[in-house]
Image (cartoon, grey):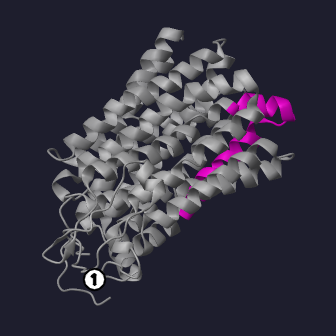
Amino acid sequence: MDVQSGHAVPDCRAVNSLGLATSLLGIRYSSRMQSGVPQKLSMAQVLTCGAAVVTLSMGIRHGFGLWLQPITQAQGWTRETFAFALAIQNLAWGVSGIFAGMVADRFGAFRVLIAGAALYAAGLVGMALAPTGLAFTLTAGVLLGVAQAGTTYAVIYGVIGRQIDPAKRSWAMGIAAAAGSFGQFLMVPVEGFLISGIGWQQALLALAACVLLIVPVAFGLREPDFTGSSVPRRDQTIAQALREAFRYPSFQLLMAGYFVCGFQVVFIGVHMPSYLKDKGLSPQVASYALALIGLFNVVGTYVAGALGQRLARRKILAFIYLSRSVAITLFLWAPLSPLSVYVFSGVMGLLWLSTVPATNATVAQIFGVAHLSMLGGFVFFSHQIGSFMGVWLGGYLYDRTGSYDVVWYIAIALGIFAALVNLPVREAPISRRMPQPA
């Protein structure tokens, strides 16, 4: 794999059929040769299968806030117990994402997706049956965090970076991010319906069965370069790629901005349902609010990805972070009502995951795609440290002050900070004086 262009290195072996599972999905691999080079996966196939995976994995996890009150009330736990488990989930997701990215870069996304789906199902079952706070932390926290690392953006974006032309890469990443948003719009109301209809435990077991649909879809992301014993050629080792990235100031600034993204979205996603209920609004308002965030983010992420092909992504990121702070400020100042909640949710939805395609496309443009999943995993690790702080501080400060106000104010200040640190980012491909031996 060429580090700068992301083009595949010639390989003269044809790619075999994927069998019954992919036939059912209408997915086929082309074994035709063009100048001895196996064709890449089609863009439609990559986007369809990648979007399906992200829709399930992100859609389910966006609804976890709906379980906060049912679980804590049924188990007699504090909100901090639940929040701490989800904070650990985000941290485990971030740590595991680095290694999932390394494996996906070396052996392809297919194997990582299969393992991630199995762990996701096991984690949801464990979340439903955990008898103690410790067991809940190990399942809802550690196990689900590891599972999400193998079924979400870092892995999917690695496939997009390798299989889709750079001229359409940012747009394609926007499509994948929009799929995660559509998953939130689709799955959050379903999860709310399941909780009210069959109870919170049975709802989690139903989702465990649902998430296994990732397994057949993953066959559509089995990359030709990773079939058999064939692997792409690399001009850098992992150590060389990491040294290069962490010595580059723009990479550090992108990580700082992504920390803020994690803090804001996970705090809102997990704690806003309880915040609204504390203010006297019905649980349905919270479900509709989270669904609206997902619906409007379909538009927001697509637009951000498309604009990333034309405008400076650093300016797009700065605008998103600053706009979030303005939206939160106006939401806190305005009289609280279902209408104000829905307006806030729509605005935040436009900004929700819009940072994802812009950030990852910038990493790909600067460093190339050979180690994109791994580098994206490190950037996402920073995001997950922010997620840990946002979800845990929400529960911790609520239990001690009886209010979420302080965390809202922190989210506003961090948004301004993130807008400022993204402006100096240099998006041009990094200059390498000579090839580095692998």
Q: Main secondary structure of the magenta part?
A: helix
In this rendering, is residue 74 above or below 180?
A: above
Above or below — where is 205 with respect to 193? below
Circle 1: is it few (<14), some (14-19), or many (20+) Cα within 10 Å?
Answer: some
**Quadrant placement of the N terminus:** bottom left
Residue at 22% from the left image edge and 59% from the top image edge = 426
| Amino acid found under the numbered disc labelled 1 | Asp
Residue at the bottom extreme, as displayed: 437
Q: Which residue is mark 1?
A: 235
Question: Where 121 sits versus 289, above or below?
Answer: below
Name the quadrant containing residue 370: bottom left
Residue 241: name its quadrant.
bottom left
Q: Residue at x 81, y 52 (%)?
A: 135
Residue 397: x percent and y percent? 68, 36
Rendering coords of residue 339 (x, y %)? 48, 9
The magenta stretch is 67-96
